Amino acid sequence: MRNIVLSGFMGSGKTTVGRRLADLTGRRFVDTDLLIIKKAGMSIPEIFNARSERYFRELEREVCAETAAQQGLIIAAGGGALTFAENADVFKKSGDIVFLDVPLEVILGRLKNDTSRPLLARPDRENAARELYEKRLPVYRSSAAYIVDASADAHTVAQNIIKLLHIKT
Ligand code: S3P
């Protein structure tokens, strides 16, 4: 059974939609960020601060390969994971990549009080997010097999994915 890989910018709802999809389909849910935290024994801001983004990306690459080697999973991939061709390629072999498309303004509202994302922990947060979003959007789109409007609530988005991919519930 192929994996379903949820892709998208920080705050696009990959984790909440993924959990909901897992509930609705009875499949197992995994989140690459949580697996990285487990592997490193520290939080994501700690990994970035105590080590480096480069180290984080190395762990991310390992976790992508390890989850892609399994079957039937719902995988929430961290927002940077699918911007690397190597991760996209490994996921494509065993799964269908679904891009959760959410306008930047909605994302900015959702992440307003967030402190868990080191890439946005800076005074020019909104500009940094905008720049990254614009750079990544075409990459997310081109690696995805499916693109889903994900501005709605997680339950609606999960149901739309089930319909679109003809998943059994
Ligand atoms: C990142 C997104 C985060 C996390 C890390 C880097 C990114 O995951 O992997 O902070 O590069 O966009 P979420 O998309 O789950 O927030």
Image: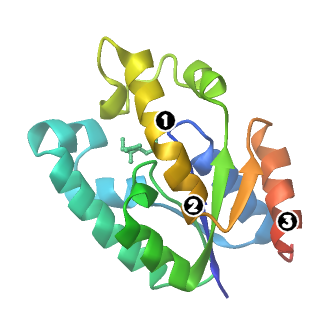
Is label 3 in a helix, a strand or a loop? Answer: helix
Q: Amino acid type of disc 3?
A: Leu
Count of numbered badges drawn on the protein: 3
Mark 1 / mark 3, whichever is N-terminal: 1
- Give the farthest residue toward the top: 123
The crowding category of the residue bearing disc 1, from other C-alpha atoms within 10 Å (few below 14, some 14 to 19, many at least 20), is some
Q: Can residue 39 be seen at all in this image of the molecule?
A: no
Residue with the mark numbered 1 = 133
Asked if residue 109 lies left or right of residue 162, the reply is left
Identified at 32% across, 58% down, the residue is 36
Residue 69, numbered circle: none
Residue 164, numbered circle: 3
Identified at 63% across, 21% down, the residue is 105
Nearer the camera: disc 1 or disc 3: 1
Q: Quadrant of residue 22?
A: bottom right
Please say if the residues under marks 1 and 2 sit with CB atoms less than 8 Å apart: no
Residue 142, numbered circle: 2
Residue 54, position as x, y percentages in the image: 17, 52
Q: Amino acid type of disc 2?
A: Ser
Ligand 1 quadrant in view: top left
The crowding category of the residue bearing disc 3, from other C-alpha atoms within 10 Å (few below 14, some 14 to 19, many at least 20), is few
The crowding category of the residue bearing disc 2, from other C-alpha atoms within 10 Å (few below 14, some 14 to 19, many at least 20), is few
Is label 2 in a helix, a strand or a loop? Answer: helix
Residue 123, position as x, y percentages in the image: 30, 11
Identified at 38% across, 31% down, the residue is 116
Q: CA distance from mark 3 to mark 2?
A: 18 Å
Q: Nearer the viewer, residue 24 or 32?
A: 32
Mark 3 / mark 2, whichever is N-terminal: 2
Mark 1 / mark 2, whichever is N-terminal: 1
Asked if residue 8 lies left or right of residue 21, the reply is left
Determine whether the beta carbon of the residue marked 3 sits less than 8 angstroms from the nearest atom of ligand 1: no
Asked if residue 47 lies left or right of residue 142, the reply is left
